Image (spheres, helix red, strand yellow):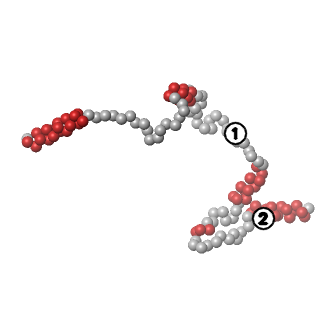
Amino acid sequence: MKISNLLAAAALAGVGLIAATGVQAETYEGVQAPVSGLNRADVQGEAMRAAHAPDQNVTRGSRGPETVELSGDRRPVKAQAIRAAAAPDQNVNPSSRVNSKLVSTMRNPVDVRAEIATRNSTRM
C-alpha cells in the first residue's frame, strides 16, 4: 500500500508542477517563410476557380487523341529507327567481359538491302 500511495503522491506533485509553470502554445510559422505576394482572399479565390474548372478530373486520353506537333520530316527518323531495330549486335553489351571491345562481325540488314537495291537500280 505504501508504494501505491507514494506513486500517487508523485503523480499529483508532477501535475501540480506542470500547472504551476504554465504551458504556453506557440504558433507554427512553417519551415520556410511564405514568399507569395497574394493575400489569403486571393489564394482562396484561385482555389475556388481551380476547384470549379471543367474536366479537371478526367483521365488523360479520354478527351480524344492528343495532338503532337511535328518538328520535321518523318522519313529520316523512321529510317533511323528501322536501322537501329535491325542492328545485328544491338543486344550485345561490350562491358560483359573485362577489357573487351565490341567489334561487329555482321553487317546491318538494312544496309545490305539498300546496297542490293542500288545495285539492282543501276543495272536496269
Assign a secondary structure to mark 1.
Answer: loop
Res. 67 mark: 1
In the image, taking residue 43 as reference, residue 119 lies left or right, namely right
Label 2: few (<14), some (14–19) or many (≥20) C-alpha neighbours in 10 Å: few
Q: Earlier in the sequence, mark 1 or mark 2?
A: 1
Please name the residue shown 67% across and 38% down the image: 65
In the image, taking residue 60 as reference, residue 87 lies left or right, namely right
Q: Position of residue 13 (x, y in %)?
A: 17, 38
Label 1: few (<14), some (14–19) or many (≥20) C-alpha neighbours in 10 Å: few
Please name the residue shown 54% across and 31% down the image: 38
- The residue singled out by tag 2 in the image is 112
Q: Which three-letter amino acid code belongs to the residue tagged 1? A: Thr
Assign a secondary structure to mark 2.
Answer: helix
In the foreground, 68 or 118: 68
Looking at the image, residue 18 lies above or below residue 123:
above
Name the quadrant of the C terminus.
Answer: bottom right
Q: Is residue 51 visible?
A: no
